[in-house]
Each structure stands twice: as structure tokens, then as C-alpha cells.
């Protein structure tokens, strides 16, 4: 017996069951009007059992259970989240571009002039080189992460082996491939769908995403440290000005006599600079803390040869095998350093400079369909 998909039919059925429940309650009250406490308790327990039976009859049959009922109840919520995330991805990308551009403008207008006018020559060269290197790496990897396709399994016939069939695409699904409900397509080595990129993070853009997180964190830390003294001066100036205005606007306060030099009257440009520096420092410090934690989390996953989705799958599998007295080993784990080399595509020492520390659009190792699961002798897969 199948549960009808028509909500009108479900509503009418629920109303009929509710009327039957009310009729049962009325019949029990009419038949035994002056019963004892034990009789009342028995009737209440009978009504409670019948109510549970009515509730279970709404979803239970040979093909469904309570989990199916919860999935059906939350299906509208899932639909709303998927569509909102899909449409708001463009807004999030615009927000990232806007905030990053505002930080760059503030640095060029207020931070760099201070560095050039007050710092020694070697520190000026250091800040110019380091700041522009971080900016170039950040912009390059964010652009590549948003515009590069994560990779999708072939839809036509392929000689490669497949491990399962996607229930939504009804197509063969290679290992480490998962279906993205937001993009409505299967993604090779899917990590997650990132709304800040408006794109899935998969096999072909995983390196760009992780590099963007690393360089964005480094850039925020650099801006926060470089503008620390300016932030302290600007905060003191703004706070002193607010206290002076509060005292001046208070009619009951006696006039103050300054025994020291009164606070300077800042111009519009200086006031704008103070507020901009405070905005810069607060924004970069907050992003450095939040994005730094996310970057460390992904670095840990990469060092273990896992994605965000595989992390949950492997933990569940490890618990299942532990109950049977076995030990789970990730078949795609090749050691921490080897996993990092595979992600960045490092095959020789010079690649650390040309492919990691400089912009590079080289393809990742492998095609994302066939994976080498060869185990080292020191780390066998226990069965």
C-alpha cells in the first residue's frame, strides 16, 4: 500500500481520524458517566492507545516508517534551503567582492601612505611585495574557484567501473562522487557546496578553494597586524571625541577647564580615515579568526585524505566496524605530506614555488573517476 502524495487526501484522512477519535471520547463519556478513578484511568489509557494507533496509521505501512514521515515533513524545508542558497550565492559572491575591494581601497588610501612616509626602506619594500603578492594570490584563486567546474561524471557509456547509481540523476556514480541538491548534479570528489563561491567544491577546484582560504586568512592577518597601531590611534581619537561631545551637550555639566592641550579638531578626511581604519581592523580580525578555523579544519581533512562528506561517512563506518572488532582505514589516505602533494599537484621540489606560491592553473592529479587505492604495507586496511 502506497501513501498518497496528495496533501488534500492526507488532510481529509486526518480529519476523519480526528472525528473518529472525538466520537470515541464521546461514547466513553456517555456509556460510563459516573465511573470511579480506576474506570476513568482505564478510559484515558484506552483513548491514549487509540490516539497513538491513529497517528501511526497516517504514515505506517509495509513501505514506510517514521523516518519516511519526517523526510516528507521536512521536504519543503529542504526545498526552501536549496533554492535560497542557490539564489543567494550571487549575493554572497558580490558581498565577498565588495568587502575585499573596500579593504584594498582603505589600505591604498590610508595604510600604505603611512608605511611609505614613516617606515625604513627595507620595511617599505617588504610591505609592498608581501601585500601585493597576497592580493594577487587571493584574487586569482577566488576567481578560479568560482569559475572552474568541480567536475561531473560522464553521462554516456564509459569503460570505467562505477560503484553505485545516483538515485536522483539515475546515472552511474564513480567512487567519491556525491549528488549536490543545490546544483542538482553529481560532483566528482564532492567536498561541499560553498555559497561564498556560488559553486560546488569538487575534484577540479578543491585546490583553488583551499588556497583561497589560506591566502585570505594570511591577508587578513597581515592587514590586522600592519594596521594595529593605526587602529589604536584611531580608536583613541574617536573615543576621545565622543566623550568630548557628550560632555559638551550635557546642560547640567559644569564647563570644563582644560589644564592640558585640548583635543585637536579633526578634519573630515582625518575623521573618515579613523573610521575606515577601525572598520578595516575589525573586519580583517574577525575574518582571520572565523576563516582561520575553517582553513585549519579543511587542512586536517586534506591531511587525512578525506572530504567533508567522507568525514561523516568514514566516522559512521569506523563505528560500525568497531562493533565487529575490526578497524577502519581510509583507502584514499597516503600520508599527510603525500595527501597535500596530491591536492596541490606537487611532483617535484620546484612545484612548491611554481604551483603553490605562485598562481598556477594546472590540473589536479587524476581524472576524479578512477582512484588508486593501493595500500602501503605499514598502513594496511584491516578487515
Image (tube, helix red, strand yellow):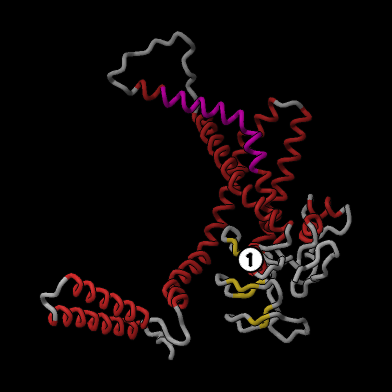
Above or below for 310 versus 116: below
Secondary structure mostly seen in magenta is helix
Q: Is residue 313 visible?
A: no
Q: Position of residue 352 (x, y in %)?
A: 83, 52
Q: Residue at x 74, y 56 (%)?
A: 303
The answer to whether residue 181 shows anywhere in this view is: yes
Q: Per the image, is 228 magenta?
A: yes
Q: Quadrant of the C terminus?
A: bottom right
From the top left corner, tell me how far across and down residue 19 is, in percent: 23, 82
Residue 91 shown left or right of residue 363 in the figure: left
Tell me the residue at 25%/80% (across/down). Answer: 18
Who is closer to the viewer here, 332 or 243?
332
Range drawn in magenta: 220-243
Q: On the image, numbered disc 1 is attached to which residue?
A: 319
Residue 50 vs residue 35, the one in the foreground: 35
Q: Nearer the viewer, residue 151 or 121?
A: 151
Amino acid at each position: 500500500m502506497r501513501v498518497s502524495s496528495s496533501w488534500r487526501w492526507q488532510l481529509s484522512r486526518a480529519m476523519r481520524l480526528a472525528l473518529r477519535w472525538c466520537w470515541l471520547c464521546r461514547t466513553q463519556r456517555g456509556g460510563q458517566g459516573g465511573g470511579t478513578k480506576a474506570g476513568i484511568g482505564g478510559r484515558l489509557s484506552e483513548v491514549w492507545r487509540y490516539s497513538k494507533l491513529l497517528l501511526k496509521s497516517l504514515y505506517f505501512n509495509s513501505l514506510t516508517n517514521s523516518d519516511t514521515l519526517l523526510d516528507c515533513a521536512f521536504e519543503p524545508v529542504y526545498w526552501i534551503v536549496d533554492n535560497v542558497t542557490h539564489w543567494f550565492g550571487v549575493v554572497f559572491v558580490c558581498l565577498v567582492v565588495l568587502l575585499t575591494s573596500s579593504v584594498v581601497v582603505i589600505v591604498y588610501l590610508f595604510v600604505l601612505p603611512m608605511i611609505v612616509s614613516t617606515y625604513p626602506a627595507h620595511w617599505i619594500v617588504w610591505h609592498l611585495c608581501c601585500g601585493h603578492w597576497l592580493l594577487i594570490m587571493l584574487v586569482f584563486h577566488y576567481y578560479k574557484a568560482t569559475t572552474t567546474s568541480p567536475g561531473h561524471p560522464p553521462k554516456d557509456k564509459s569503460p570505467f567501473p562505477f560503484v553505485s547509481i545516483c538515485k536522483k540523476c539515475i546515472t552511474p556514480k564513480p567512487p567519491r562522487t556525491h549528488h549536490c541538491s543545490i546544483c542538482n548534479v553529481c560532483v566528482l570528489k564532492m567536498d561541499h557546496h560553498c555559497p561564498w563561491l556560488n559553486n560546488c567544491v569538487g575534484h577540479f577546484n578543491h585546490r583553488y578553494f583551499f588556497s583561497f582560504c589560506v591566502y585570505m586568512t594570511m591577508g587578513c592577518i597581515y592587514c590586522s597586524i600592519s594596521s594595529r597601531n593605526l587602529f589604536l590611534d584611531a580608536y583613541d581619537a574617536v573615543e576621545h571625541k565622543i566623550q568630548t561631545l557628550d560632555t559638551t551637550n550635557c546642560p547640567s555639566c559644569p564647563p570644563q577647564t582644560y589644564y592640558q592641550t585640548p583635543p585637536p579638531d579633526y578634519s573630515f578626511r582625518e575623521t573618515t580615515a579613523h573610521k575606515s581604519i577601525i572598520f578595516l581592523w575589525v573586519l580583517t580580525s574577525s575574518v582571520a579568526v572565523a576563516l582561520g578555523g575553517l582553513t585549519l579544519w579543511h587542512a586536517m581533512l586534506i591531511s587525512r585524505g578525506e572530504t567533508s562528506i567522507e568525514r561523516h561517512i568514514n566516522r559512521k563506518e569506523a563505528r560500525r566496524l568497531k562493533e565487529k572488532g575490526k578497524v577502519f582505514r581510509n583507502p584514499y589516505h597516503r600520508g599527510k605530506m603525500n595527501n597535500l602533494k596530491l591536492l596541490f599537484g606537487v611532483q617535484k621540489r620546484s612545484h612548491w614555488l611554481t604551483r603553490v606560491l605562485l598562481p598556477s592553473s594546472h590540473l589536479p592529479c587524476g581524472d576524479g573517476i578512477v582512484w588508486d587505492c593501493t595500500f602501503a604495507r605499514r598502513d594496511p586496511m584491516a578487515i
